[in-house]
Amino acid sequence: MDIKTAEKFMEKLVKAGTEYGFEECEASFSIDKSMSMDILKGEVASFENSATSTLSFRGLKNGQMGYCSTNILDDSSIDYLLKSAMENCEVLNDEDPQFIYCDENNKNLYFSQVTEAYEKNTYKSFSELGLSLEKAILALNDRIDAVDFLSIACGTGPYLIINSKGLHSFRDTDGISLYAGARVTDSDGSVKSGGHYWVGKDIDDFDMDKFLETFKENLIGKMGARSSKAGSYKTILKREAFQQFFMVFFGNFTATTMQRGLSLLADREGEKIASDAFTLKEVPMYDKALTKIPFDDEGVLTTEKAIIDKGVFATALYDLKSAYKAGKASTGNGFRNGSAVSEMPTNLIVEAGEKSFDELVEEVGEGIILTDLSGLHAGVNAISGDFSLLCEGYLIENGKKGRPVEQITVAGNFYDVIKSIKSVGNDIINVPSGEGEFFTPSVYVGELAISGDDESNQ
Amino acid sequence: MFNDSDCQRILEEAMSTTADFAEVYQEVAEVKSVSLLNGQVIRAATGFDSGTGIRLLSGTNSVYVYSSDNDIEVLLKLAREAAAAIKGSDKGKIEALKDLCKTSKATIEIDPMSVPKKDMVDFLRKSADYALSYNPLITQAASGLAATTRTAKIINTRGVNAEDTTKRIRLSVETIATKDNEKQSGRVAPGTMRGYEFINEYPLIDKTRECCETALRMVNAGYAPSAKMPVILGNGFGGVIFHEACGHALEATSVGIKMSYFTDMLGEQIASPIVSARDNALIDGAWGSYGTDDEGNASSDLLLIENGILKNYLIDELGARRMNAKPTGCARRQNYSYAPTSRMSNTYICNGESDPKDIIANTEYGLYCTQMGGGSVDTSTGDFNFAANEAFMIRNGKIAEPVRGATLIGKGQEILKNIDMVGNDLEISAGMCGSVSGGVPVTVGQPTIRVSSILVGGREA
């Protein structure tokens, strides 16, 4: 299904929706086009190529918004969509009004970020890169048993939105991602696994040497890892771990979560909630980001803003519905999650500090670096902020990175952690996250409780 | 959809180069759901999706293409592109299509799709009304019902011509207790392939009360200790430990590429001799069941472990090729946008001989996890973790104070060997399992069991 065909169908649908009795209505259409390849043992083990599309309709009747979606775009679908959405309106009794939106000055936006470089993504270019990367990984160390996964994927994601108020906007983006993981047998026979990833827009930007350097550290660096004794440790969350950690609790910064009484940050905009050293911004059109997002899924223009400014909770994220309830304007963070809209971040940026990673380690003196956190969907209480997570990393001894550790858990509370941040590094990387990316350095978060069962004193 | 002659044309196109096997998977799915928060209906949605996946194999190489556009010309073009991408030396043959084999493990009296949303809302509202008036500390009550129906048709070059229909419904109830800055929840989320009669018979008020009680207990509880100790895992969803720490490592997805710590261990003692376990997709009306797997093979009741001895792996077509074995009817996928692979269905530790009361009485000191949260495992190293949503300390053989924030961590290989008591109160419990072929409905299960030693990560020394 192409955009042109969908566009015609959507115009017809929106017109039919108004005639059917909806006060306002809206149709959005997205296509997920992707290609991916897995390399295993010197061969292209699997190759995928796909295009899937979804058409979502929502209509407003008596203040209630009914939703329905399908991938079939023919006349019978129009009846199905309108009837189902109307039925849904009839059972809803949400007290908070919802909106179909159109900004008269920005109602016909067109923003495509798909570059010519996308054409370089072919079976041939992926297989050449994948096979040579697998070979290079195996050559890193003779204890590497196997590259368990090596996956390269690319995709584009056009999004078109049309509504009865006159909005007619389009955006598109593309990207490439590469993930690799391998296994190494340690001297005691135990197995360690580790990996690395890369995201970009041009396959020629992939820097093999740089990738391998980090890959090696993430895998070979784990050899000799064992548990550590329990105690309170000065802790650095390595940049990837900090991103994972922060995003688990990110829902607390959204207005809907607050309004439902499920966030301890409710009514605290303007209050100091974190350390002075911590500033978090949302920059939807960030020039270093792979995906720039000019408008959200409700057609509202996105805006640059601080979410936490030197420790002060500057603003929550709002969509049209939660903004109205709070008497504010939408911050352009209404994105579709399945059928319904909820607040999601675009590109998030943790403001870098002065220190390099090594200088952060030196500042800690004696403590621990956590590089991998596991069980983030299970070992946290997203509301209270309590967490207890399996993790891996390295000890910090005499201001230097020491031996690797595994089979330990770290426990604490999110709100305490952001208050006790001591220093933010300057080793920024970008990790795909939310609707965009999360740019973060490593962060020294103060002391955390570590449990482990190492008997020795090392 | 489901046009045999079109599917045959796709197979012919797919086999035009060097594939030795090709398969066409077509699916239509419909979903309807309602969600309530504090008695307000905040979401009501309906959706329809359909699509086609075409898979080509040549030895252990695979090419998978899929589209939500079911137009025959689009699919033929995709099949041609797939045929161009497959690497192989021999051209396979296409066997004549067998008679259609239709299956379903759903046991439906009242089709959930035929139930008006208003009835669903009225049902859920009873839970909300009860919870919000139960105790002033109960501040939120969320509930939802989601029904899905899916028919998948699979035909392949071996003549397989199968169609399986699943009809699932899942209820969720969550209540939240608030005290100062602390919020804790209690939840139940039963799922079934029985019809809406399951919902009509469900003891909603009793279960809502239990959720409230759990939330209230946990909001008043102190933190769990950090130490190695004996851990008793309650029946039902406690089986998530087995699912994560053992089940995933028995899937051909990891065994087939020799990545699992259970690779090449058939016939070996991998668990305590009092442990037997099965993966049984045949249970009528169970949430994780199916009649035909997503490769068109009949589903099965597979003995995984018998008295601690590893008896079987979960094997799909590609895994079978890698392992030189036969598929076990366990290939699954979330939908047409995923190639199928080996997955679990209803996976449980079988009943043992101990009375659950005796397990507690025989434990001087330890942790008793009555409700588990989710967890995850690295199948190459065996590292697993999972969280307890409700737990109590055991002191002198008796259930003592409730504790919160407990995470259990360890190595899958070790924990199975450390199971030292198995109860006789087997239950299974619905969940969703995520892996390379997407999220699929599964049940986990077990009787009450005791593990002699697990590292508990809490906040108190």
Image (cartoon, rainbow, N blue to C red):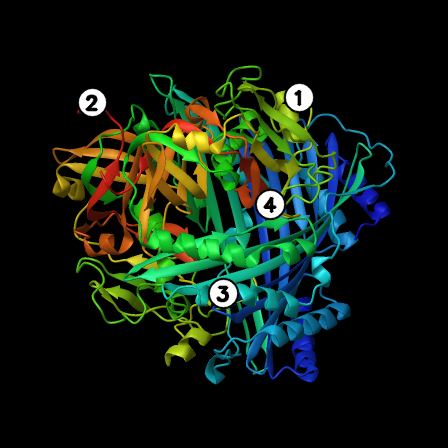
Q: Looking at numbered disc 1 in the image, what kind of residue is underneath it? A: Ala
| SS for callout 3 | helix
Alpha-carbon distance for marks 2 and 3?
Answer: 54 Å
| SS for callout 4 | strand
| Mark positioned earlier in the residue sequence (4 or 3) | 3
Between marks 2 and 3 in the image, the one whose residue lies nearer the viewer: 3
| SS for callout 1 | loop
| SS for callout 2 | loop
Alpha-carbon distance for marks 4 and 2?
Answer: 44 Å
Q: Looking at numbered disc 3 in the image, what kind of residue is underneath it? A: Tyr
Q: Residue at x 47, y 82 (%)?
A: A103
Which residue is denoted by mark 3 in the rendering?
B130
Which residue is denoted by mark 2 in the rendering?
A456
Chain letter of the residue carrying label 1: B
Q: Which mark, by number, is residue B325?
A: 1
Chain letter of the residue carrying label 3: B
Q: 10 Å neighbourhood of mark 1: few (<14), some, or many (≥20)? A: some
| Mark positioned earlier in the residue sequence (1 or 4) | 1
Q: Nearer the viewer, residue A91 or A173?
A: A91
The reply to whether discs 2 and 3 touch (Cβ–Cβ < 8 Å) is: no
